[in-house]
Image (cartoon, helix red, strand yellow):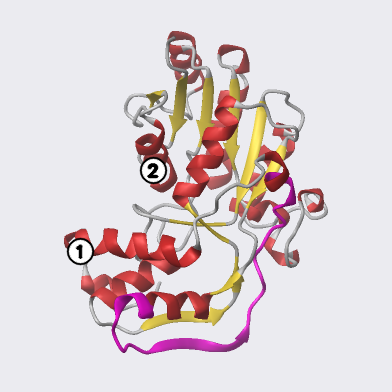
Amino acid sequence: MASMRVLVTGGTGFIGKNLVEQLASDFDILAPRHAELDLLDERAVAEFLNSHRPDAVVHCATKPGHRNSKDPTGLLDANTRMFFNLTGRKDLFGRLILLTSGLVYDQRHYRPKMAENYFDTHVPVDETGYSKYLCARYAAQLDNVVELRPFGVFGKYEDWEIRFISNAICKTLFDLPVTLRQNRRFDYIFVDDLAKVIRHFLVADGTRGAYNVTPDEAVELKTLAEVVVRISGKDLPIRIAQPGLGVEYSGDNALIKAEVPGFPFTPLESAVRSLYDWYTEHRHLIRRDLLLVDK
């Protein structure tokens, strides 16, 4: 039997690159680079889909708006246009797995363990959140789309200059203090676990249109820093710029646990240790001077 053909957009990004690696053994993966497929070009998207006829699309591609972005302008237009160019030709593929995030709930109104039905209570005002919100709201009207909402995702290939867990690991490798602006509680999922969830939805029909993809418990950033320092085996300080506990960023995972009973989330310390080992082996990729100033 021929392998299921899966188009992964954003295959050179953090999540996409991990997915391509982890799904390639079981699926026929298409992961075109920008030069091969411009998702902002409606005609190019239609021609690519018509030519390759994927059984499924995993849409990871996004124009970032974070503090390390080279060009955050035009984010709303780019992210919505890529999505609508794909869904506009939904007749040319089987199902679409859309990755958004907890930002769809509007960061001005976060509350602990937000459930999926909290969506659309508020409309995000930041461009990143608003673009994800618009895509999620439209996706809810389509019968061949499953929206997955991870909150914090960590793993190899992420931007170690700004992403907390990777940044903390890299700092300890260079004997630098671990720093954070303020302690907060986050829901973090290991990218390997996210890949397993996506694998499930590639072969199984979901009973819902949208799922938070989060672990059982949120974790404090300070606790994560302590885990990283303990794994390093070094006596390094943890410095917190602002006192108190910031707004929690977490989602209820009851729906995904019901969808995939007994899903084996990787224990947080085991996942961090695995990532620590990876950075130790790839230390040559890290520039110490870029760790000296927090972005």
Residue drawn 69% across the image and 53% down it: 253
Left or right: 257 in relation to 26: right
Mark 1, Cα crowd under 10 Å, few <14 / some 14-19 / many 20+, is some
Where residue 244 sits: x, y (%)? 62, 88
Q: Is residue 90 above or below residue 294?
A: above
Taking depth in this image into account, of 235 and 137 the one nearest to the observer is 235
Q: Is residue 145 above or below residue 12?
A: above
Where residue 100 sits: x, y (%)? 60, 45
User: Magenta stretch?
Assistant: 229-256
Say what amino acid the circle numbered 2 marks: Asn
Q: Is residue 3 above or below residue 11?
A: above
Q: Which mark is residue 27?
A: none
Taking depth in this image into account, of 174 and 119 the one nearest to the observer is 174
> Does the magenta-highlighted stretch encompass residue 254?
yes
Query: According to the image, label 1 marks what residue?
Result: 283
Where residue 223 sits: x, y (%)? 51, 78
Residue drawn 56% across the image and 24% down it: 86
Residue drawn 40% across the image and 48% down it: 14
> Does the magenta-highlighted stretch encompass residue 170?
no
Dot 2: element: helix
- Circles 1 and 2: CB atoms closer than 8 Å: no
Residue drawn 33% across the image and 24% down it: 36
Left or right: 283 in relation to 212: left
Taking depth in this image into account, of 80 and 139 the one nearest to the observer is 139
CA gap, disc 1 and disc 2: 19 Å
Tally of marks: 2
Mark 2, Cα crowd under 10 Å, few <14 / some 14-19 / many 20+, is many
Mark closest to the chain's N terminus, 1 or 2: 2
Q: Is residue 162 visible?
A: no
Where residue 21 sits: x, y (%)? 35, 37
Query: According to the image, label 2 marks what residue?
Result: 18
Say what amino acid the circle numbered 1 marks: Arg
